[in-house]
């Protein structure tokens, strides 16, 4: 009888604190989080390197809050989200991804005007990057 109670407590504990059936993928593998986060990073880089374009700060902040809320809905804790965005490895990966995009679009760190051309194009297209920027 004692073993039955121990088994019942174990089963009840498993029901009240279920373990995930499979591990969650890294947030980098969740396109609805990764792609908008990348757009925010690219927009910030453009605003940092082009004097005629500014970042739409509150729009970017709102997007980051929306992404955090969505990640929470997908089962990621604030601690997991913070670890992802503060990870040196993820920052380096995001920078490398940005360099590829900039290279493909003719943007060069040696020529800040190329950031402006790219940024103004994105603003005109009203792209995910462009909506985070404003012409000064």
Image (spheres, helix red, strand yellow):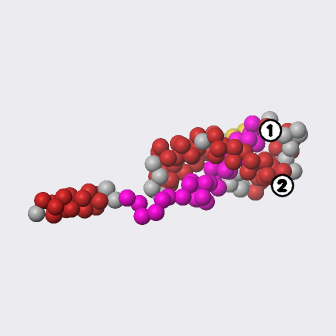
Residue shown at 29%/59% (left/top)?
14
Snapshot quadrant of residue 136: top right
Q: Earlier in the sequence, mark 2 or mark 1?
A: 1
> 35 above or below 46?
below
**Which mark is drawn over residue 30?**
none
User: Residue 52, position in %: x, y?
Assistant: 80, 38
Quickly name the residue at label 1.
50
Asked if residue 4 lies left or right of residue 71, the reply is left
Q: Nearer the viewer, residue 30 or 4?
A: 4
> 117 above or below 15?
above
Residue shown at 45%/55% (left/top)?
75
Residue shown at 71%/56% (left/top)?
127
- How far apart, in angstroms, are the residues tagged by discs 2 and 1? 18 Å
Residue interval drawn in magenta: 19-48
Q: Main secondary structure of the magenta part?
A: helix
Tell me the quadrant of the picture where the N terminus can be found.
bottom left
User: Residue 32, position in %: x, y?
Assistant: 58, 59
Residue 121: in magenta span: no
User: Residue 134, position in %: x, y?
Assistant: 72, 43
**Which mark is drawn over residue 104?**
2
Tag 2 secondary structure:
helix
- How many numbered tags mark residues here? 2
Q: Nearer the viewer, mark 2 or mark 1?
A: 2
Residue shown at 82%/44% (left/top)?
115
Tag 1 secondary structure:
loop
Q: Nearer the viewer, residue 133 or 1?
A: 1
User: Crowdedness of circle 1 by 10 Å Cα count: few (<14), some, many (20+)?
Assistant: many
Residue 114 seen in render: yes
User: Crowdedness of circle 2 by 10 Å Cα count: few (<14), some, many (20+)?
Assistant: few
Residue 30: in magenta span: yes
Asked if residue 9 lies left or right of residue 88, the reply is left
Asked if residue 94 lies left or right of residue 52, the reply is left
């Amino acid at each position: 009888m004692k073993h039955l109670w121990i088994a019942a407590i174990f089963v009840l504990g498993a029901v009240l604190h279920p373990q995930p059936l499979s591990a969650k993928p890294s947030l980098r593998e969740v396109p609805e989080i990764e792609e908008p986060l990348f757009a925010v990073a690219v927009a910030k880089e453009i605003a940092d390197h082009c004097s005629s374009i500014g970042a739409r700060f509150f729009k970017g902040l709102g997007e980051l809050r929306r992404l955090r809320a969505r990640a929470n809905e997908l089962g990621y804790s604030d601690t997991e989200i913070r670890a992802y965005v503060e990870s040196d490895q993820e920052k380096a990966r995001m920078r490398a991804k940005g360099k590829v995009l900039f290279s493909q679009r003719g943007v060069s760190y040696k020529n800040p005007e190329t950031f402006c051309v790219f940024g103004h194009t994105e603003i005109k297209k009203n792209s995910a990057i462009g909506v985070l920027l404003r012409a000064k």
